[in-house]
Amino acid sequence: MEIKNQTDNENEIMVQADGLVKIYKTKETEVLALQGLDLTVNRGELTALIGNSGSGKSTFLNMIGGLDRPSAGKLYVDGNNLFAMSEKELVLYKRDTVGFVWQNNGRNMLPYLTAIENIMLPMNLSSLKHKKDKALELLEMVGLSSKKHSKMNMLSGGEQQRIAIAIALANSPKLLLADEPTGSVDSATADYIFGIFSELNKGGQTILIVTHDMALSKKVKRVVAIRDGKISSERVLKEQFVDRVRESNIDWRAEDTQDEFVVLDKANRLQIPKELIDEMRLEDNKVKIAYKDDQIVISKP
């Protein structure tokens, strides 16, 4: 497996995507899912990816998870070059480096096994000792010790998702990936699941979440928006909300909790938010640009 010669600064990086491209080909057409995406995620960050359906966010998550191969560009995770991995190395990478929480609970658990048996299943592929003790610790962490002998059909959707988080953490992955983890649960359960992620992150776990859940995304310290296969903007949690993410008396959907920044790519291009373009009521695709009083001003011709 190819490992980069890392500097101290690079050692702080968990995910490094540089000009990442993904093309899906069929007999009739080609779909450009990622169009030169650049993103860095540092160790210990909890980052959310947002974007409309088809924007490329789940494609990106699947490539980080080793489930899909990039078409071009560079992608390193924990110093591993995902372009250079053999199939055998990729299996070890998926076992030891990343854990995946799916929105579809059927992909997380085997229905004929109990909760504790499902959690122990990934451990059977590793050399981890005291597997049952570790599984019991994970059940306690997600608040479901009493459900250890329950099979999937005996658990609610929210309970299944909490077991799925425990399964994803079974082999102590360096990076936890979650694809719409609150997409099929009620708001109370979504809050509980976010609480689990928050506690994990406080303990140093690096977490990357794809979500459409506005309340969840507005609690995250760093939110990256993908549009048309590129990073278009980033939102950063305002300082006054950093220590309040567990408070239930805040209307997280309505509150202005984050500052938004448009992201320049390596060619100094940016994507202007669509709602601002709509307000300008342009007649074509041209605008005037000027630098005035320490500001870049974009105006109609």
Image (cartoon, rainbow, N blue to C red):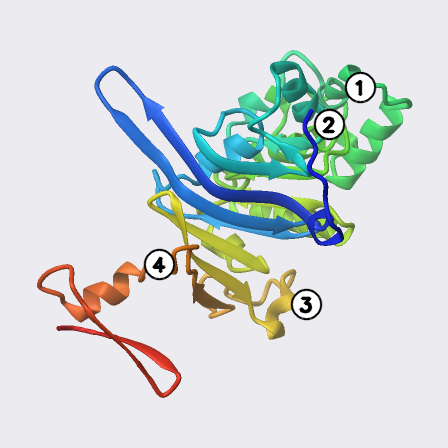
Q: Report if residue 100 is visible in the image.
A: yes
Residue 90 location, x and y as percent?
A: 63, 21
Q: Which disc, if any, is residue 126?
A: 1
Give whichever of discs 2 and 3 has the lower sequence position.
2
User: Quarter of the image holding residue 245?
Assistant: bottom right
User: Quarter of the image holding residue 292?
Assistant: bottom left
Q: Which disc, if any, is residue 96?
A: 2
Towards the viewer: 173 or 131:
173
Distance, label 3 to label 1, CA atoms, is 37 Å
Three-letter residue code for mark 2: Asp
Whether label 2 touches label 1, CB < 8 Å: yes
Tag 2, which secondary structure? helix
Q: How many marks?
A: 4
* Label 4 crowd bin: few (<14), some (14–19), many (20+), radius 10 Å: few
Q: Residue at x 55, y 28 (%)?
A: 83
Give whichever of discs 3 and 4 has the lower sequence position.
3
User: Quarter of the image holding residue 294?
Assistant: bottom left
Marks 4, 2: nearer the viewer: 4
Give whichever of discs 3 and 1 has the lower sequence position.
1
Q: Quadrant of the N terminus?
A: top right
Residue at far bottom of view:
293
Q: Which residue is mark 3?
A: 243
Residue 65 location, x and y as percent?
A: 58, 30
Residue at far right of view:
130
Q: Is residue 77 above or below residue 86?
A: below
Three-letter residue code for mark 4: Arg
Q: Which residue is mark 4?
A: 269
